[in-house]
Image (spheres, rainbow, N blue to C red):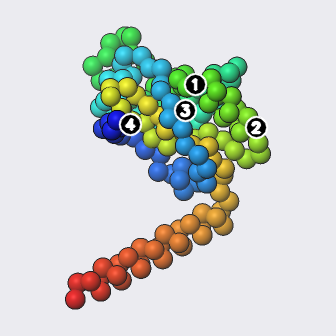
Amino acid sequence: MGQKNTKMKIVCENRKARHDYFIQETYEAGIALVGTEVKALREGKANLKDSFALIRNGEAFLENVHISPYEHGNIFNHDPLRIRKLLMHKAEIVKLFSKTQEKGLTLVPLKIYFVKGKAKVELALASGKKNYDKRQSIAEKTAKREIDRALKERQKY
């Protein structure tokens, strides 16, 4: 097996998704974009806040992703909140559709990045967290941070 080229440039990340959802599986999908959207993404002008993916008529779509208009674009510039088609294998789409029909599962984009010049999105099959789950996650994170800090202090001497 050849070595995998993992040169990837992350454009934007949805950090809040990991706080609001339990991530069960992740998938990689291509995004069908117009020219000015690609240029805006290369400048890092994207926002995944409140975005989601859904499957309609056997096709996957990404909604509520804000890609700012390209600064040097003309009258043919894109609509920032347009619905974008995701490029995935049919078998993956069918699998995701059946899983999203289960109670409480949804498709959430985690990050947009470039691999070998192609724009990709990392989708997560996720279930929502309740408030007490979020508080528990914050408490665990704080405890881990304090332990790491104590160990670091101990290693100084």
Structural crowding at the residue carrying mark 1, measured as other residues with C-alpha within 10 Å and reported as few (<14), some (14–19) or many (≥20) = few
Query: Which residue sits furthest front?
Result: 1
Q: Please name the residue shown 45% across and 41% down the image.
A: 111
Q: Which label lies toward us, 4 or 2?
A: 4
Q: Secondary structure at mark 3?
A: loop
Q: Which residue is mark 1?
A: 89
Q: Which label lies toward us, 1 or 4?
A: 4
Structural crowding at the residue carrying mark 4, measured as other residues with C-alpha within 10 Å and reported as few (<14), some (14–19) or many (≥20) = few
Q: Which residue is mark 3?
A: 64
Structural crowding at the residue carrying mark 3, measured as other residues with C-alpha within 10 Å and reported as few (<14), some (14–19) or many (≥20) = some
Residue type of the residue flagged with mark 4: Met
Q: Label 3, label 1: how many angstroms apart (C-alpha)? A: 23 Å
Q: Is residue 90 above or below residue 130?
A: above
> Residue 22 location, x and y as percent?
61, 54
Q: Is residue 72 above or below residue 7?
A: above
Q: Label 4, label 3: how many angstroms apart (C-alpha)? A: 39 Å
Residue type of the residue flagged with mark 1: His
Please name whichever residue, 71 or 102, is drawn nearer the observer in this view of the structure: 102
Q: Label 3, label 2: how many angstroms apart (C-alpha)? A: 21 Å
Q: Please name the residue shown 55% across and 43% down the image.
A: 26
**Residue 101 shows which numbered tag?**
2
Please give the count of numbered marks on the rendered protein.
Answer: 4
> Residue 1 location, x and y as percent?
38, 36
Please say if the residues under marks 3 and 1 sit with CB atoms less than 8 Å apart. no
